[in-house]
Image: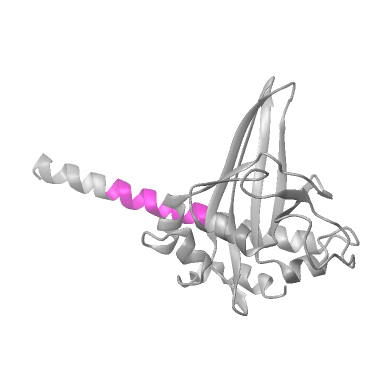
Amino acid sequence: MNRWIVFPLLVLSCLTLSAASAAAGFQDDVDQAATILQRFREIPEKSIPNSVLKSAKGLAILTVVKAGFIFSGRGGEGLVVARVGKGWSGPSAIGTGGAGFGLQIGAQVSEFVIVLNTPEAVKAFSRGGNVSLGADLSVAAGPVGRDVATDVTPMAAVYSYSRSEGLFAGISLEGTVIAERTEANAAYYGRSVTPTQILSGRVKPPRGAQKLLRILDKY
């Protein structure tokens, strides 16, 4: 076969495999988010209050790995969903990363649930690009306790919670920057889509998101 024909076919094949890999990778994030929500619900007495979850306008769910020796690095991937009507939107891919300096040996995996308390918080994640917690949105460690009553007006636009090595706590993520993962969204939905389209409910969630959505429907 003529090499001028073979080369484009190889490129197309590589692009197809890359898109499939990106979609599969984000499906793993969606499945992991469902697992994280289930784990958070199983924590007795020290969990996200039901009142916080029921009034949430959206949720961001991340798995973050921190690892290093002397120099430390942190990176994470996950998703954000928004409440739409009587249900929830499909997932929009997000990620975070950073670097630090300090003596750290080994790796630590942390799971985060970030509660978006206001429509403005959802809009910040809908615009695409980066969202800086503490700068673009006020953030605070969320109250804990399944039956804890909270004020009608949240103390911050965003509440954050973490689970690491079996320990659960409200934790501040001040200074954390969360970014849209454009390629992952395009691969997962099969076309170019924006976070605004996804989080407004204008894009139908893929079949692979149904388990996550069933769990979210409990809130």
Q: Is residue 27 visible?
A: no
- Quarter the C terminus occupies: bottom right
Q: Is residue 113 magenta?
A: no
Q: In the displayed structure, does residue 51 sit left or right of residue 107?
A: right
| Rendered residue at 77%/61% (across/down) | 154
For the residue pair 204 and 65, the one nearer the viewer reads as 204
Q: Residue at x 8, y 43 (%)?
A: 2
Magenta region, residue range? 13-27
Whether residue 32 is visible: yes
Task: Say which quadrant the N terminus sits in.
Answer: top left
Q: Main secondary structure of the magenta part?
A: helix
Q: Is residue 120 above or below residue 73?
A: below
When the figure is inspected, residue 122 is found, relative to residue 8, above or below; the finding is: below
Q: Nearer the viewer, residue 16 or 83?
A: 83
> In the rendered picture of this protein, how many numbered marks are placed on residues?
0
* Picture coordinates of residue 110, whole percent (x, y): 72, 44
Q: Say which quarter of the image contains residue 147.
A: bottom right
Dividing the picture into quarters, in which one does residue 64 lie? Answer: top right
- Give residue 70's position: percent from left, percent from top: 69, 19
Determine the image quadrant of residue 30. Answer: bottom right
Q: Residue furthest bottom?
A: 86
Q: Is residue 23 magenta?
A: yes
| Residue 204 or residue 5, whichever sits in front | 204
Tell me residue 185's x, y (percent).
45, 56
